[in-house]
Amino acid sequence: MAKKGDLLFELAVGSNGNIVVTQPAPKVYLISFTSPPDNRLTTKFCTSLILALDILATRHPAGVVITTSGITKFYSNGLDLDHASFTPGFFPEALYALWLRLLTYPMPTVALINGHAFAGAFMTAMMHDYRVMNPHRGFLCLNELELGVPLRAPMSSVFREKLSPVTYRKLVLEAARMKALDALKESVVDSLGGLEEALTFIDEMKLVAKASPGLTGKSALVELKREMYRETVGYLENFRDEDARDFKAREQEKTRQAKRQERVAKWERAKL
């Protein structure tokens, strides 16, 4: 079994959680987050994780970042819906800020999914470059259909940009719960296993070297990622536009629905 390596630093997450950052291999950084009971994506969780990523990017040599959970059952159980709905600035300043940082991070990123990753947690894993999943525990699921909650633009677009249309449909319109083997077959995850397998994957893919500067003396990793995922990056950076777009869509749908009711009523009257 691979060891988590030397401790680099630790951050608090609220009053009873923490983020522990270690180095299990040269230039490979493991971020382990623990926020009981199930690593909900609250403001404190997101901002603490952003800080951990910033510390690694600015104070340590470029390499590879792995994120995982210190809670066996869950990678994360997604958003706290009350917190997300009633906390001012949560989306642009916490959740979207975290996702943008992960999606355009200046090092390769790997989500080591040790347990369940539902909804927002699944989206967070998708913001990483690669995913390695525990083959013995956990489901990946977008359960918004079951909750009766629509997906915001970047929540949907990241799946559209990274997965096949059939897999995208299965996740969004069927709320499919994917076990590890199914996720691997659908290319939702790249490999199966725990930390040891994740380190092997990083070594085989030569990911540490991908963070190094190119022949120009500079790294183009951030720019390449921004272009690859232009749609999602745009949504994450322009939160206010999303609200305006959603309001316009709702108003247009009200108009269309009124016309539908009128057509059906006219048809009913004609039958009399």
Image (tube, rainbow, N blue to C red):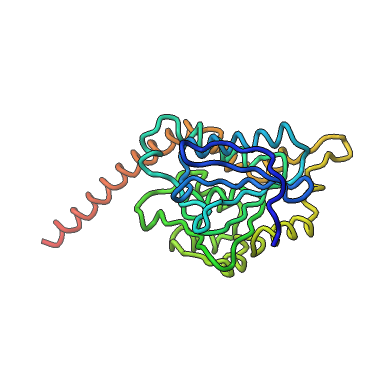
Q: Quadrant of the C terminus?
A: bottom left
Residue at (50% x, 33% y) in the render: 92
Q: Position of residue 195 (x, y in %)?
A: 67, 58
Residue at (18% x, 53% y) in the render: 265
Q: Is residue 268 left or right of residue 229?
A: left
Q: Is residue 65 left or right of residue 243?
A: right
> Within the image, what quadrant is residue 211 found in?
top right
How many numbered dots are placed on residues in this image? 0
Q: Is residue 50 left or right of residue 224?
A: left
Front residue of this view, candidates 42 and 258: 42
27 versus 51 height, above or below: below
Residue at (50% x, 47% y) in the render: 155
Check the image and name the residue furthest to the right.
215
Residue at (53% x, 65% y) in the render: 137
Q: Position of residue 192 (x, y in %)?
A: 64, 65
Q: Position of residue 18 (x, y in %)?
A: 54, 41
49 versus 203 height, above or below: above
Q: Position of residue 29 (x, y in %)?
A: 70, 45
Q: Quadrant of the N terminus?
A: bottom right
> Within the image, what quadrant is residue 264 found in?
bottom left
> Within the image, what quadrant is residue 232 found in?
top right
